[in-house]
Image (spheres, rainbow, N blue to C red):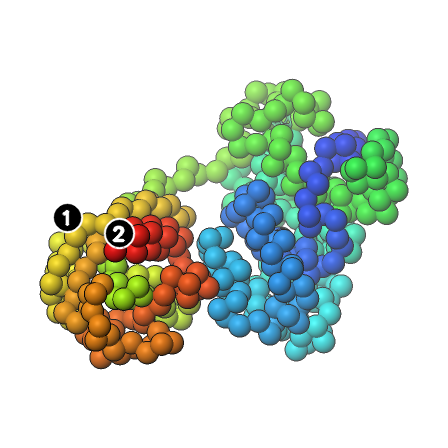
């Protein structure tokens, strides 16, 4: 264990990716990156993080931002509970700590929505404290290096892994050795000042770049000589996680209603999946073939005058494979040439039957709203197809 730490620190100094959140020690910026990186790849997060920090550069600005703004900034990243919790936590920091990110692990852990991993990551990366981290990448690296065959999700084994992570970062605190110097990478002096920060990041980085779930690059791995899984040819078996459930298919039908260049859309209510995001009227079809006309009647309260297939959008989220069949429908009182639309200029509800379902929005207004991923694809397709074909 003693020898692992300098090897990993040296490797990180020479190989760390130049990521925008690695150029700062602002705990707020690091916290935002950690929340975005949950279940999301680095290359996807970079533009979102840059935009977020530009638009909401402080804890106070996040605490005070409108729900529309935070959802729009998060649009496409998915798992939207994350952004709502991020704002709640920012509000708690303003209320309890005057808008200043607490620098003590227990205070960070006490914040709503921040768990042991995130608190450890913020305290080590921003404040160079010897606080351990354990996420999927780190679990993979540690179970392989130490040859831990038990399921790492089981309580006892998980706690054992936390203890190893703690021991390692504790040793890093006193590490002084960093042989390589490269000014474009974390420098030797920086490593000496921030060994806990860099050690934890080295575990994450090794898991992301070298000790990957499939086909790990053992040939170039800095800790290969100490790796039990490599030595005993057990890499494929570790970590010992249960196989993922196979993805379940779900089918939805969505209805595109257009009237004088505006589209009928609705906002998902609080307390449901993708709360606060926008979508076209839609419903899930359970079992068997969809009957879109009946589904449209259920949603709009009257049978559509006309219904025609428009597009099929496929989308994956967590363990679901979603197929969204979209239909262009004409409901009584709406048509692309109708001159008696009841909508107001602001796009509020009117008296047309379909208007009980949602609100009318122009393409420009829709651009400013946060849509679920599948409906965003659908919106751009529908706007192009319907309005260009008029
Ligand atoms: Fe992972 Fe291979 Fe390195 Fe072991 S030697 S830590 S399995 S990359």
Q: Residues within 10 Å of mark 1 (few under 14, many from 20)?
A: few
Distance (Cα) linking label 1 and label 2 = 29 Å
Residue 309, disc: none
The tally of labels here is 2
- Residue 19 lies, in percent from the top left, at 68, 44
11 or 342: nearer the eye?
Answer: 342
Residue 389, disc: 2
Query: Please, what secondary structure does the residue beneath circle 1 have?
Result: loop
Q: Is residue 293 above or below residue 339?
A: above
Residue 267 occupies quadrant: bottom left
Residue drawn 57% across and 64% down?
86
Q: Is residue 241 left or right of residue 355?
A: right
Residue drawn 48% across and 69% down?
68
Q: Quadrant of ligand 1?
A: top right
Q: Is mark 2 within 8 Å of ligand 1?
A: no
Q: Is residue 217 left or right of residue 2?
A: left
- Tell me which numbered mark, 1 or 2, is placed earlier along the sequence: 1
For disc 1, the marked residue is: 289
Q: Quadrant of the N terminus?
A: top right
350 or 60: nearer the eye?
Answer: 350
Residue drawn 85% across and 33% down?
181
190 or 57: nearer the eye?
Answer: 57
Residue drawn 75% across and 53% down?
24
Q: Residues within 10 Å of mark 2 (few under 14, many from 20)?
A: few
């Amino acid at each position: 264990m003693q020898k692992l730490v300098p090897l990993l620190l040296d490797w990180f100094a020479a190989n760390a990716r130049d990521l925008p959140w690695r150029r700062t020690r602002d705990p707020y910026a690091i916290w935002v990156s950690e929340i975005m990186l949950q279940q999301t790849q680095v290359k996807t997060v970079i533009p979102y993080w840059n935009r977020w920090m530009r638009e909401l550069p402080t804890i106070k600005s996040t605490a005070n931002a409108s729900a529309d703004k935070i959802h729009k900034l998060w649009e496409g990243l998915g798992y939207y509970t994350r952004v709502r919790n991020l704002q709640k936590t920012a509000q708690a920091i303003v209320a309890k700590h005057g808008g200043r990110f607490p620098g003590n692990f227990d205070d960070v852990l006490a914040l709503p929505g921040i768990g042991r991993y995130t608190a450890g990551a913020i305290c080590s990366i921003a404040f160079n404290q010897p606080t351990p981290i354990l996420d999927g990448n780190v679990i993979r690296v540690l179970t392989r290096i130490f040859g831990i065959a038990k399921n790492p999700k089981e309580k006892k084994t998980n706690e054992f892994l936390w203890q190893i992570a703690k021991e390692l970062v504790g040793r890093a605190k006193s590490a002084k050795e960093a042989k390589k110097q490269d000014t474009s990478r974390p420098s030797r002096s920086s490593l000496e000042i921030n060994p806990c920060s860099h050690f934890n990041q080295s575990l994450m980085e090794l898991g992301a770049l070298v000790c990957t779930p499939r086909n790990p690059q053992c040939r170039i791995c800095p800790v290969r000589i100490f790796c039990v899984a490599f030595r005993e040819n057990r890499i494929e078996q570790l970590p010992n996680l249960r196989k993922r459930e196979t993805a379940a298919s779900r089918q939805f039908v969505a209805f595109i209603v257009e009237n004088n260049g505006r589209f009928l859309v609705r906002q998902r209510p609080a307390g449901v999946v993708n709360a606060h995001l926008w979508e076209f009227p839609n419903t899930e079809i359970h079992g068997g073939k969809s009957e879109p006309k009946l589904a449209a009647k259920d949603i709009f309260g009257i049978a559509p005058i006309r219904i025609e297939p428009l597009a099929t959008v496929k989308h994956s989220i967590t363990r679901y494979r979603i197929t969204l069949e979209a239909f262009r429908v004409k409901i009584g009182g709406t048509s692309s040439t109708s001159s008696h639309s009841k909508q107001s200029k602001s796009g509020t509800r009117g008296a047309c039957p379909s208007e009980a379902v949602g609100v009318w929005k122009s393409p420009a207004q829709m651009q400013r709203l946060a849509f679920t991923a599948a409906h965003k694809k659908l919106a751009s397709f529908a706007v192009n197809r319907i309005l260009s074909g008029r």
